[in-house]
Amino acid sequence: LARILKNNINFLGNLAALKQWYKIVRQLFFSGAFGSALHSGLCWQCDAAIDERLKQMDILSQKASQYLEDCAGDDSAASAGGSKIRAFVNAWPGARQAIRDCVNSLPEDASGQSFLQAVEKAISEKGQNYLAVISGLGQNEADMGSNWLYGVAKAVEEKALLHLNFLQRIVQ
């Protein structure tokens, strides 16, 4: 269970980072009649992927709850991780809401702003050629972007772990 939760929380964090990338950086390269629609579609796809992952986690929570009900009175099942399963079932609604809130209100931070400025400068020099601009960034700028996106993913993970505290020692 811990491995499944850890991997799913990591995946949700990475989806949030991808959403931020599309929302903040990639949108700089969309123009013309279809640019706005394409940008909206990409952001919608990220939201749909996040919603689907949360739905799958809801199903996991329901199955875990059913397992606990099925094992009621069986001390061997309860001792074989039952307390962590119960902790997950009880904490999941709060963790789910914390993840959703975090994804919907990710703050802009200094590394994200610095990276965005570097991308905007590169656009002014190279035009709106996405591949030329992104691949032409220097190592410093690329590291800023990586650190920013890592911070986005980490923020989602940290919000989830506030509720799923039994996972903290496993994730770190």
Image: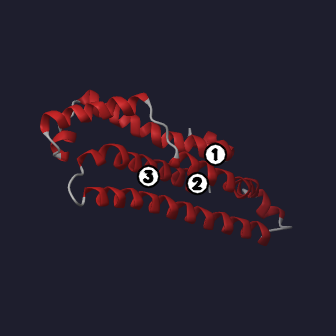
Q: Are marks 2 and 1 in contact (CB under 8 Å)?
A: yes
Q: Are marks 3 and 1 in contact (CB under 8 Å)?
A: no
- Residue 67: image location, x then y, percent: 72, 68
Quickly name the residue at label 2.
5
Q: Residue at x 73, y 70 (%)?
A: 66
Quickly name the residue at label 1.
167
- Residue 18: image location, x then y, percent: 39, 49
Outermost residue, bottom direction? 70
Q: Give the side of residue 167 with respect to residue 50, left or right.
A: right
Q: Nearer the viewer, mark 2 or mark 3?
A: 3
Q: Residue at x 50, y 64 (%)?
A: 52
Distance between the alpha carbons at the discs numbered 3 and 1: 20 Å
- Sort mark 3 into few (<14), some (14-19) or many (20+) by Cα contacts within 10 Å: many
Mark closer to the chain start, 3 or 1: 3
Does dot 2 land on a helix, a strand or a loop? helix
Which numbered disc covers residue 15? 3
Does dot 1 land on a helix, a strand or a loop? helix
Q: Amino acid at mark 1?
A: Leu
